[in-house]
Image (cartoon, grey):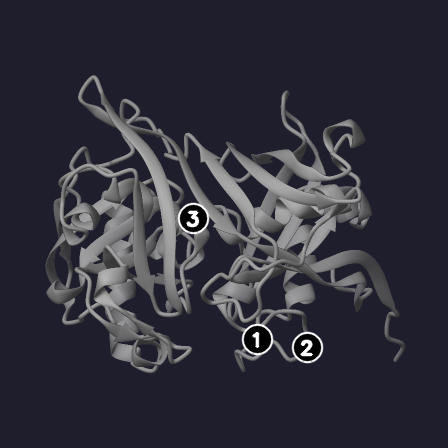
């Protein structure tokens, strides 16, 4: 029996923020994968090494965590006044599907730098030395992201002394602006789909919890840590080694997704793992981060832990950080209350790997809260470039 040869697909492996993914230019993909559909999904799953019943991604580029099971496609912008289209696929680790329902805030950083590396930005917009302003159209959620990418001698400056908790080595700072990051939906433009800053969320078989459900950055369900038996100082292993806890979090997430109108039946949540996120908040408390570093209560405004793809995230998803910053800016939300109340334009929160600062500009217009932009700093670095190989009968 003959077996097909492997095919080569040009690709670049990049760390962006506290995530990493396999990046492709649309024009480099096999013809069948240049359009959305089954062929593209099968390609991405095979590249990452999913679905993997061993949850190890031994036979692929993934790292068997939500932070490392990602693929990205960049192409010339399809909308005016932008440089590139950025399309993101979150590859399920143990199930055969790719979730296209949201963005990855961390990889948005890498999308800005890769756009320059890949020759997708007009050279006239790239200074020899300085900061290139890359205008990104986030094609999954149809939003604008502005990446301020440092450039030295006409090339992206990747090395530097900017430190990001959750990333082992320092690199060059890239400032991201998420423009109008809330999902306006159909309910009169509110970023709170239920119309409330805080709801009583009834979770069948689990209980009823206070919840803030917001669509800024990425749809997110926030609950109080103490209401579900936590302190907000938990690290990844404490949650991820507890199947009963993970099941409970998924039940809360599904209930939130139903209340937010993201799904119509609980069964739909199985193929919508990427959104919404579920996070729990607590007032500042001194704790030891996963690196062993002490995070002092006086150095943060609140504590946040968030789950991604069914597991506690080792740091914080960039899109969830936008949700945190936005909710923190709006008096009355659970996030704002955990941070001590009052209006604010920036918040520093503690996560399992350390701290992160995010800014958000929110204002009340005609009785509705709106957010004009959220800002945070990340970094990105190319780890490897060349081509990925996949069996010729993949799609």
Viewer-nearest residue: 309 or 336: 336
Q: How many labels does the image show?
A: 3
Q: Kindly tell me whether residue 26 is visible in this rendering.
A: yes
**Rendered location of residue 71, percent (x, y):** 63, 56
Between 148 and 322, the residue placed more toward the observer is 148
In primary-sequence order, the first of circles 1 and 2 is: 1
Cβ atoms at labels 1 and 2 below 8 Å apart: yes
- Residue at the image position 29 percent from the left and 33 percent from the top: 191
Mark earlier in primary sequence (3, 2): 2
**Residue under pointer 3:** 319
Along the polypeptide, which appears first: circle 1 or circle 3?
1
Q: Which of marks 1 and 2 is in front?
A: 2
181 sits left or right of 146 in the view: left
Rendering coords of residue 288 (x, y %): 31, 77
Crowding near pointer 2: few (<14 within 10 Å), some, many (20+)? few
Whether residue 260 is visible: no
Find the distance from the CA under tag 1 to the CA under tag 2: 9 Å
Label disc, if present, on residue 59 of the rendered structure: 2
Circle nearer the viewer, 3 or 2: 3
Q: Distance between the residues labelled 1 and 3?
A: 26 Å
Instruction: For mark 2, give the secondary structure.
Output: loop
Element type at marker 1? loop
Residue that badge 1 annotates: 52
Residue name at image x 53 percent, y 40 percent = 140
Q: Which of the two discs, 1 and 3, sits closer to the camera?
A: 3
Which residue lies at the image location 15% right of the left edge and 60% below the top edge?
204
Few, some or many residues within 10 Å of mark 3 (<14, 14–19, 20+): many
Using the numbered discs, state the Cα–Cα distance from disc 3 to disc 2 in whole angstroms.
29 Å
Quarter of the image that includes the C terminus: bottom right
Residue at x 61% of width, y 54% of height: 172
Please provide percent x and percent y for residue 146. 55, 35
Tell me if mark 1 has few (under 14), some (14-19) or many (20+) residues whose alpha carbon lies within 10 angstroms of its own. Answer: some
């Amino acid at each position: 029996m003959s077996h097909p040869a492997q095919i080569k697909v040009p690709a670049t492996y990049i760390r962006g923020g506290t995530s990493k993914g396999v990046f492709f230019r649309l024009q480099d993909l096999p013809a069948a994968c240049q359009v959305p559909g089954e062929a593209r999904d099968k390609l991405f799953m095979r590249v990452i090494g999913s679905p993997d019943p061993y949850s190890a991604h031994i036979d692929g580029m993934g790292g068997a965590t939500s932070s490392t099971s990602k693929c990205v496609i960049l192409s010339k912008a399809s909308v005016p006044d932008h440089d590139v289209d950025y399309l993101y696929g979150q590859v399920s680790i143990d199930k055969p599907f790719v979730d296209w329902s949201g963005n990855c805030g961390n990889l948005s950083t890498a999308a800005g730098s890769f756009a320059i590396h890949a020759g997708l930005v007009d050279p006239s917009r790239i200074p020899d030395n300085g900061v290139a302003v890359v205008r990104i159209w986030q094609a999954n959620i149809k939003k604008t992201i502005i990446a301020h990418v440092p450039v030295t001698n006409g090339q992206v400056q990747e090395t530097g002394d900017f430190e990001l908790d959750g990333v082992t080595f320092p690199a060059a700072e890239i400032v991201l602006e998420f423009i109008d990051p809330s999902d306006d939906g159909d309910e009169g433009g509110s970023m709170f789909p239920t119309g409330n800053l805080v709801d009583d969320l009834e979770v069948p078989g689990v209980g009823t919890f206070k919840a803030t459900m917001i669509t800024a950055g990425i749809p997110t369900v926030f609950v109080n840590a103490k209401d579900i038996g936590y302190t907000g100082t938990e690290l990844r292993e404490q949650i991820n080694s507890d199947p009963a806890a993970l099941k409970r979090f998924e039940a809360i997430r599904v209930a939130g997704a139903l209340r937010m109108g993201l799904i119509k039946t609980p069964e739909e949540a199985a193929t919508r793992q990427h959104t919404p996120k579920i996070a729990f908040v607590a007032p500042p408390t001194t704790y030891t981060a996963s690196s062993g570093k002490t995070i002092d209560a006086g150095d943060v405004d609140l504590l946040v832990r968030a789950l991604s793809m069914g597991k506690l995230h080792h740091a914080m998803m960039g899109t969830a950080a936008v949700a945190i910053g936005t909710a923190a800016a709006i008096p009355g939300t659970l996030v704002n209350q955990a941070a001590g109340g009052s209006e604010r334009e920036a918040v520093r929160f503690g996560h399992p790997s350390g701290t992160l600062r995010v800014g958000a500009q929110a204002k009340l217009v005609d009785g509705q809260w709106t957010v004009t932009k959220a800002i945070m700093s990340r970094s990105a670095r190319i780890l490897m470039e060349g081509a990925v190989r996949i069996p010729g009968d993949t799609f």
